[in-house]
Amino acid sequence: MTKKDHPPDLSDLQKRIAAAREREQAANRPDAQKRAMASGYGMAIRLAVEMVAALGVSVFLGIWIDGELGTAPLFIMIFLVMGMGAGFINVYKTVSGFSHGSLRDPKSGKKDGTTRGD
C-alpha cells in the first residue's frame, strides 16, 4: 500500500476541529466591558422593577381596602409608606447581596478584590 491509500491521521483532524471551535468561540465572545455594562443595566432595571412592584401592590391594596371600608385616603397612605419601606428593603437586600462577596472567582472560590470585606 502506498501513502495515498491510508486514511488521514485522526489526531490531526481533531486538532484542526478544536482550533476551529476555539476561533469561533473567540469571535462570538463579548468583551468584558460590554458584559459589565449590560450587567449594570440589568441590575438597574431589576432594582427599579422591585421598587415599582412593591409600591404598586401596596397602593392597590390600600385603594381596595379604602373602597371596601369607605375610608378615603387612610389605607392608601398607610400602605404607601409600607410599600416604600418594602421596596427599599428589597433594593437593599439585592444590593448588599452583590456587594458582600457574591462576586467570586469561580475557579478559586476567592473574592475578586472588588467586593467589600477582602
Image: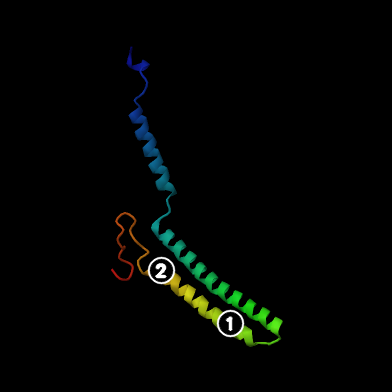
| Image vertical order of residue 34 relative to residue 72, above or below | above
Q: Nearer the viewer, residue 117 or 32?
A: 117
Give the residue at mark 1: 80
Q: In which quarter of the image is residue 69?
A: bottom right
Residue of label 2: 97
**Residue 20 appears at what percent x and percent y?**
40, 38
Q: In this view, does 100 lie to the left or right of 44?
A: left
Residue nearest the viewer, comparing 81 with 24: 81
Quadrant of the drawing holding the N terminus: top left
Q: Who's the residue at 57% across and 72% down the image?
A: 53
Instruction: Give x and y (percent) for residue 75.
Output: 63, 84
Callout 1, which amino acid?
A: Leu
| Element type where label 1 sits in the image | helix
Residue for point 34% across, 30% down: 12
Q: How crowded is mark 1: few (under 14 residues within 10 Å), some or many (20 or more)?
A: many
Which label belongs to residue 40?
none
Disc nearer the start of the sequence (2/1): 1
